Amino acid sequence: MKAIVFDMDGILFDTERVGDQAWRQAAEEMQFAEIDAAIEDCRGLNRADTRAFFEAHFPHVNYPAFHTRNHEIMAELLADGMPIKTGAIELLQWLQKEENNF
């Protein structure tokens, strides 16, 4: 093996948990009860596809306001840094130690 490639978003960093928390908080503030279904259906979508999904399935939600508030909450949650997934540091340390064995 010559290389290992990681997608850091959700693999090394726990972005999914933080993102879900921000979506839930923004939804609660905007009284949007269907957020859990939206989170699952939008996971992995880009911004344009997420907006299209909201406009098609939740036309009663002001998506630009939701998006803005979600990003404000994310900034608050990440003020002290991005949480690292359990085991990520140990994995990277092991890979570094074993790099000559591949």
Image (cartoon, rainbow, N blue to C red):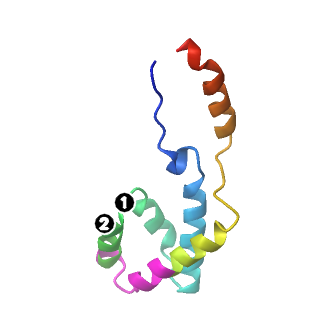
Q: Residues within 10 Å of mark 2 (few under 14, many from 20)?
A: few
Residue at (48, 29) in percent of width and height: 4
Horizontal and vertical percent position of residue 18: 60, 62
Residue at (53, 71) in percent of width and height: 23
In terms of secondary structure, what is the magenta stretch mainly? helix
Label 2 belongs to which residue? 49
Residue 45, numbered label: 1
Q: Quadrant of residue 87?
A: top right
Q: Nearer the viewer, residue 44 or 12?
A: 12
Residue at (40, 56) in percent of width and height: 44
* Residue 74 in sight: yes
Q: Is residue 55 left or right of residue 34?
A: left
The vertical placement of 17 against 23, above or below, is: above
Q: Disc 1 vs disc 2: Cβ atoms closer than 8 Å? A: yes
Magenta-highlighted residues:
56-68
Residue 70 within the magenta-colored segment of the rendering: no
Horizontal and vertical percent position of residue 19: 55, 64
The vertical placement of 68 against 46, above or below, is: below
SS at circle 1 = loop
Horizontal and vertical percent position of residue 35: 50, 72
* Residue 61 in sight: no
Q: Quadrant of residue 90?
A: top right
User: Which amino acid does the dot numbered 2 rest on?
Assistant: Asp
